[in-house]
Image (spheres, grey):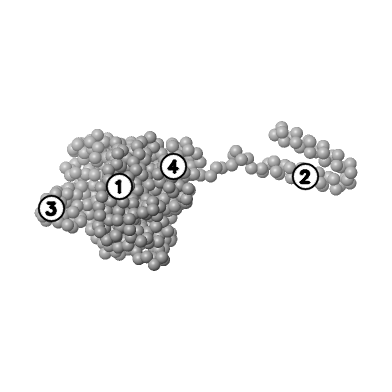
Amino acid sequence: MADFMILFFMISGTLCLYLKFSTMLKSLSIYFLAISLLVSQFLFAKDPIKEKKTAQLHIAHYENVLGTSLEIKTSVFSESQATIAEQTVLQEIERLSKILSGYDASSEFSKWMNTHNEAIPVSKELFTVLHLFDDWRFRTNGALDPAAEIVNKVWKEAASKSTFPSQEILNRAIADVKQVHWILDEKNQTATHISNAPLKLNSFAKSYIIQSAVNAALNATELNGIVVNIGGDMLIKGAIHEKVWISNPKADAENDAPIDQLFIQGKAIATSGNYRRGELINGQWYSHIVDPRTALPANEVISATVITNSATDAGALATAFNVMKPSESIAMAENMKDIDYLIVTRNGERFESKNWKSLEDAMPAKTSAINGQKDWTKEIVIGLELAPQMGYAKRPFAAIWIEDKDQKTVKTIALWYNKGRWLPDLRDWYRKNGSSLSADPNTFISITSSTRSPGKYTMKWDGKDDKGISLKPGKYSVHIEVTREHGGYDLLEQELNCTNTDQQFTLKGNSEVGSVILAYKNKSSEN
């Protein structure tokens, strides 16, 4: 303010000298106009230090989190905010896993399962999840039940013997499921375990943890927005308008075209389906999702995606909509608020909520053989298994690309890196392609899908270049480069003769890659 007053008087003095050469009325008008302009510029000038910075997107990938993969996206104004959010999410996942896990013998839930007919004081988190199961078991008329594990064990045993369970065994499983498994006392926050049935909290544990992790991150630091995606189920909060792909349940590769793509903001989205886990009995695939009411695998619906405000609701409904008939699911959704869904049946029928179309983004048009070259009838399938890591492990940075016989890159199939960082660490790919790199808008898209296993990825190449133009069959080489921050480095290469002969190769890595299986074979019928 002192500097402004000095400036004010200096300008005033200059203007006073000018008054000697002008009429009084005209001079006064100019004087007050000049002062007004100066004050206005001073008061409303932008301070570059105080101007709000542009938010930047930070992305972190982890494997071995709740038995699957984790992706954290944060829209932040500083690196420290992204770090705090990431650490908070991991800490909250770890904390709640120690409470809710059915696979950790030392978790609170596992210890409670070892009690019987005794009112045990439990944590708020365990009490809440048990109460959620009671609520949704009632609302879905038993389609969601913590004792579905009984039925899963029946079918796993049947698969091990390559036979079908008898009706007697199924009836016994149904009777065991229908038991009351616990009694809750809300006043004293106790839970009494009263059945002998094996129980798992999977239908709610993951989605409950996602909700809690996002809330913890938002409370820990200022965030412009955040996305937490665990195994294909995610919650999007803040000023992030996220593009989300829905995996094709009849496709098996990470880079297969989605069945739909959406723009989502401020919502949770969950997908459940039978296409990644299950049992094979005498050549017939049976879903890991079972109907506790019939003790049979739920095979009519192959994928259900639900969008709503709550991660726990989205997770519960996505699983329930796989178990129930589409007509049941539609009727249930119509009696609830803010529920959108896409249900896909085994015979390819799609059932969408009335508002679904408003969430969709236009799907890219399929390219045609504009150069006169016919599309290939075969494809290269790349099965990449990362080297096993102990505990939560950051997914390494990787590039998978195809070169022709002249060592020219014709197709980059996958490129994993943190946005704006670590790309030069993929030194072979970057040396060959970095100078011509243009941002692929699909590189950082979120994907919702049935829960996937950690560390295993399948990619395909259909003989088309980066522009979608079919190339001539011939000799092409697959290149796989994998590195990790403060970790190892692997560079693998294999040439394939892409003509009419099926081929298969197995490659081994040294530190970051466990194994790679390359197969040149007929395209799947779903392409």
Name the front one of labels 2 and 1: 1
Is disc 4 in contact with disc 3, using a CB cutoff of under 8 Å? no
Name the front one of labels 4 and 3: 4
**What is the number of callouts on the image?**
4
| Whole-number angstrom distance, CA of label 2 to CA of label 4 | 55 Å
Residue under pointer 1: 384
Q: Residues within 10 Å of mark 1 (few under 14, many from 20)?
A: many
Q: Quadrant of the C terminus?
A: bottom left
| Whole-number angstrom distance, CA of label 2 to CA of label 1 | 71 Å
Query: Considering only order in the chain, which callout, 1 or 4, is on the residue closer to the N terminus?
Result: 1
Q: Secondary structure at mark 3?
A: loop
Q: Position of residue 156 (x, y in %)?
A: 17, 49
Q: Amino acid at mark 1?
A: Leu
Q: Quadrant of the N terminus?
A: top right
| Whole-number angstrom distance, CA of label 2 to CA of label 3 | 93 Å
Q: Amino acid at mark 3?
A: Ser
The numbered disc on residue 34 is: 2
Q: Name the residue furthest front.
A: 406
Q: Amino acid at mark 4?
A: Pro
Residue under pointer 3: 162
Q: Is residue 67 left or right of residue 164?
A: right
Q: Position of residue 242 (x, y in %)?
A: 43, 51
Query: Considering only order in the chain, which callout, 3 or 4, is on the residue closer to the N terminus?
Result: 3
Residue under pointer 4: 424
Is disc 2 in contact with disc 1, using a CB cutoff of under 8 Å? no
- Asked whether the viewer can see residue 300, the reply is yes
Rendering quarter of residue 259: bottom left
| Whole-number angstrom distance, CA of label 4 to CA of label 3 | 50 Å
Query: Considering only order in the chain, which callout, 3 or 2, is on the residue closer to the N terminus?
Result: 2
Residue located at (78% from left, 46% from top) = 33
